[in-house]
Structures are given as structure tokens and as C-alpha cells.
Image (cartoon, rainbow, N blue to C red):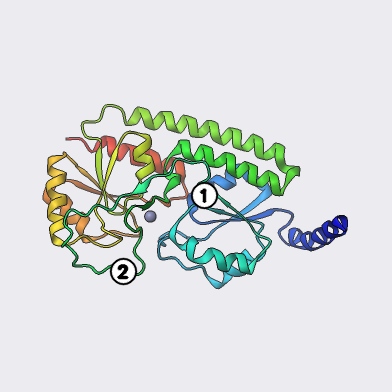
Amino acid sequence: MFALLLGFLTLFAAPLAAADEGRLLVFVSVLPQQTFVERVGGERVRVRAMVQADQSPHTYEPTPRQVAELARAQLYLRTGVAFEDAWMPRIRAANPRLRVIDLRQGLPLLTIVDHHHDEHDHDHPHGLDHAHGRDAPDPHIWTSPPLVKAMSATIRDALIALDPAGSEVYRANQAAFAAELDALDGELRTLLEDLPSRRFMVYHPAWGYFAETYGLTQVAIEREGKEPGARTLTALIEQARREGVRLILVQPQMNPKSAQEIARAIGGEVAVIDPLAADYADNLRRLARLIAGARE
Ligand code: ZN
């Protein structure tokens, strides 16, 4: 009976594999993850990211085309961004065969602390689509190379489980990628040594794991996913002055007035950098140089 069942599963699986030219079809939520899976999977996988450049993973909704393609996918690698919670039940319903693996497994997760300097400063109502609730788990796990190295092992094991014939390839690719991540980590540590200020401001606090890894502190400007009110803005300007903050980061998906206002008030610099960039290593090098260069 078990053999018969296996036979049926193989019958159903075979045409799907053929349609994808024998390659595994893997979905991820954000573009940096796509880079990681392509590094480990090489030619044996096709990877699709749900959230494309210039879209926010917090308010994102899958397209009908993506939902149709998901029905043919073998693997979904989660990272914990907001739309996953809303969409995962529907994605699973559309494709009960889909293996879903959470890349957060085994990682030391941080919390996004949404400070309220002034509890009465609510000129923005709590939005339905607010990015991270108070003290929510921080989903931006891909911003730290040591964590990506751990994730790459999870990716390797997930690919081997679905495609044992490729295990040699996956092991070799992951080892090479891990070595590159180690080298990147060393480079970033050198760039970020001996800074006069280890604090930077950021509109949307996407760099928590990067900051944690390199002994930096990010100060978030947004409050519950919204522009801060006037009092909070004044408090942030005072804090930036007090703590010698010079650099204010924004991302292309969100470039709000408050960041410009703080920069103007402190004579600091606003830099646009995308935590969702597919070009992972160069993007982090650029971030480290921005932080290192933002000295008085
Ligand atoms: Zn985010």
C-alpha cells in the first residue's frame, strides 16, 4: 500500500518537474533571499521572489501570476515579513504539496522596540497596515552576514531534502558561499572599527541585525510604521544632537519628510540605501562605508 502511494506521488510529481526543466521551483519573500538561494542552488533551482524592487514587504500583495506559479512550486522559504502571515494559509491551500521552511529557525531573533517618547503624541492613527507592532519580532534577518551563513545551511538542507541527487552540488555551493560571507564579515568589521559615533538614524528600522552584529545602534524615526508626530520629531532631533548622530538612512520604498527635517536640523546627511537590494554583499559594503564616513 505504501509503495502504491509512493508510486502515485511520483506520477504526480514527474510532470511538474518536467515543466520546470527538471529544476526545483523555489519561492522566497524578498530579493536578498533570492540571491542566497541562487548561490546555494545554482543551476538546479529557479528562484522567484514575491516582493519586487521598490515594493514594501509590509503592505505587499501577491499578483495572480505569482499565485498561479506558486501552485507549481516545490519550496517556499519564509523570512517572517508581514505579508507572509496574511498569505501563507492561502498559499498552502493553493498548493498543499508545497514545502514551507522558515529561515528564522535556530537564529537568535531580535525585537523591534517601538519606543514611545511621548504617549500623547498620536497625530497619526494606528493604521491597519502598520509595519511592525510594538515590540514585534524583527523580520530583517538577512542584514547580518553571520546570520545569512546560518540560513545558507538551512537552504542547503531544504534543497537536499527535495533533490537528493543534487546534494554534492548544494554542499559545494554552500561551502563557497559561506566562505564569501566570512570574508565579507571580516571586511565589514574592519570598516566599522574605531568609529567616533556608533549610532545612526534610520526611518524604517531595517538594519537591526546588522547593527547588532557590528556593535552599532540604529535609532528608528518611524512610529508604528508611520511618520512621527511633531513632538517625537523634536525629541529625535535633540537625541541626534546629544548622541552625535550624523547619518540618517532611508530606503527607496520610503523616503519621508521627517528624515529630511532631522538631517536639516542637525546638519547631517540623508542616504538612500535599500535593505531589499538583491546585490547583497556590495550593498552591505556601501552601508558600512556610509556609517564609517559619517564622522565629524
Ligand atoms: Zn521592514
Residue 138 position, x and y percent, is 39, 50
Q: CA distance from mark 2 to mark 1?
A: 28 Å
Mark 1, secondary structure of its residue: helix
**Would residue 14 appear left or right of 235 to someone viewing this image?**
right
Residue 230 pos. (x, y %): 14, 61
Find residue 127 and name its label: 2
Q: Nearer the viewer, mark 2 or mark 1?
A: 2
Taking the spot 65% from the left edge, 50% from the top edge, the residue there is: 45
What kind of residue is marked 1?
Gln
Marks 2 and 1 in Cβ contact (< 8 Å): no
Sequence-first disc among 2 and 1: 1
Q: Percent from the top left, x then y, of residue 5?
A: 83, 59
Q: Quadrant of residue 286?
A: top left
The residue sitting at 70% across, 46% down in the picture is: 161
Identify the mark at residue 193; answer none if there is no mark: none
Quadrant location of residue 68?
bottom right
Write down the residue under mark 1.
33
Give the class, few, some or many, for how many residues have Cα within 10 Å of label 1's Cα (few <14, many ≥20): many
